[in-house]
């Protein structure tokens, strides 16, 4: 009986040329992807909320590990010049990060001096934040660049004072036990819903001066930069991948 059933299944699945003819033969039912839900403001249920507009309890000063000194007003956190960078208390590897940022509505300075900040993954790899609306600077340092490594595919920057969104997929680099990099990291960036970095290879640390470095490391913190401009952030959440 089992033989007959097998033969029947074989005949109904394959034709004489050995081609699959039964749609169910290529259906995969297990495992079933787990379902997520969404909060009222669209945050997925498996995300870690890093800033909800109320406190910076998930953040600390990079200089001394003390409380983050940026101001909170109208549900956003704003850089206070001279207080330094802030970083998450928790460390992360590969992840999906969502955040919204706004450069000052009053234009001061030009080039790198206008609305400058940055999002650093593992405190080493920067996606540039800058007011790049009608503001020329070096292309691998404008908004959405992987700083001094990859120019954004397009300039998707809104005008000063408008809220902008970054949705970033970070694939962490890997190192072997001897400290040698065996797999590069990658960044995919959507700026205001527009793809501006498409699985771009991270060449190493995003240095201001000199070439990228590739010293071994593991999971590390997300860092936001104090570049002396009052850039604001809100609605920051992250998903571990």
Image (cartoon, rainbow, N blue to C red):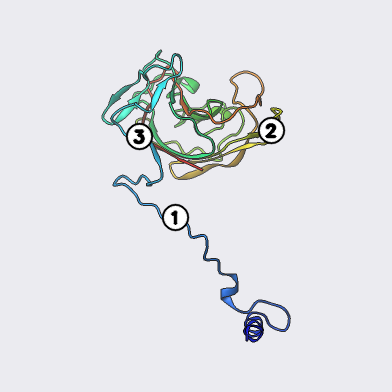
Q: Are marks 2 and 3 in contact (CB under 8 Å)?
A: no
Q: Is 22 left or right of 56, judged from the image as shown?
A: right
Residue drawn 61% across the image and 39% down it: 200
Above or below: residue 60 compared with residue 12: above
Q: Which residue is mark 2?
A: 176
Q: Residue furthest front?
A: 1
Indicate which label's residue lies in the foreground, 1 or 3. Answer: 1
Give SS at disc 1: loop
Q: Are marks 1 and 3 in contact (CB under 8 Å)?
A: no
Per the model, the C-alpha gap separating discs 1 and 3 is 36 Å
Q: Is residue 159 visible?
A: no
Q: Position of residue 57 (x, y in %)?
A: 34, 26
The label on residue 34 is 1
Left or right: residue 122 versus residue 47 is right
The residue sitting at 65% across, 24% down in the picture is 215
- Res 162 label: 3
58 or 124: which is nearer to us? 58
Q: Nearer the viewer, mark 2 or mark 3?
A: 2
Examine the image and state in which quarter residue 107 appears.
Answer: top left
SS assignment at label 2:
loop
What residue is rendered at 44% in x and 36% in y? 157
Which label's residue is closer to the chain start, 2 or 1? 1
How far apart are the alpha carbons under marks 2 and 1?
32 Å
Query: Between residues 126 and 231, which one lies in front from this camera angle?
Result: 126
Marks 2 & 1, CB-CB < 8 Å contact: no
Q: CA distance from mark 2 to mark 3?
A: 43 Å
Query: In this view, which residue lies farthest toward the left?
Result: 74
The picture places residue 232, in percent across and down from the top left corner, at: 36, 27
Quarter assignment of residue 159: top left
């Amino acid at each position: 009986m089992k033989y007959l059933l097998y033969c029947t299944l074989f005949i109904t699945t394959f034709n004489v040329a050995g081609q699959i003819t039964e749609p169910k033969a290529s259906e995969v039912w297990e495992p079933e992807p787990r379902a997520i839900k969404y909060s009222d403001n669209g945050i997925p249920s498996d995300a870690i909320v890093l800033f909800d507009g109320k406190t910076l309890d998930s953040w600390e000063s990079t200089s001394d590990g003390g409380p983050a000194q940026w101001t909170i007003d109208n549900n956003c956190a704003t850089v206070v010049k001279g207080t330094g960078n802030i970083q998450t208390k928790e460390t992360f590897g590969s992840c999906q990060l969502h955040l919204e940022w706004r450069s000052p509505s009053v234009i001061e300075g030009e080039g790198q001096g206008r609305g400058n900040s940055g999002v650093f993954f593992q405190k080493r790899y920067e996606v540039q934040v800058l007011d790049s609306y009608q503001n020329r600077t070096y292309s691998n340092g404008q908004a959405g660049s992987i700083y001094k490594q990859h120019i954004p595919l397009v300039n998707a920057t809104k005008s000063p004072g408008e809220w902008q969104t970054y949705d970033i997929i970070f694939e962490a680099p890997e190192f072997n036990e001897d400290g040698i990099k065996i797999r590069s990291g990658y960044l995919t960036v959507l700026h205001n819903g527009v793809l501006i970095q498409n699985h771009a290879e991270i060449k190493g640390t995003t240095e201001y001066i000199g070439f990228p470095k590739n010293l071994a490391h593991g999971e590390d913190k997300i860092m936001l930069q104090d570049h002396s401009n009052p850039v604001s952030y809100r609605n920051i959440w992250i998903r571990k991948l």
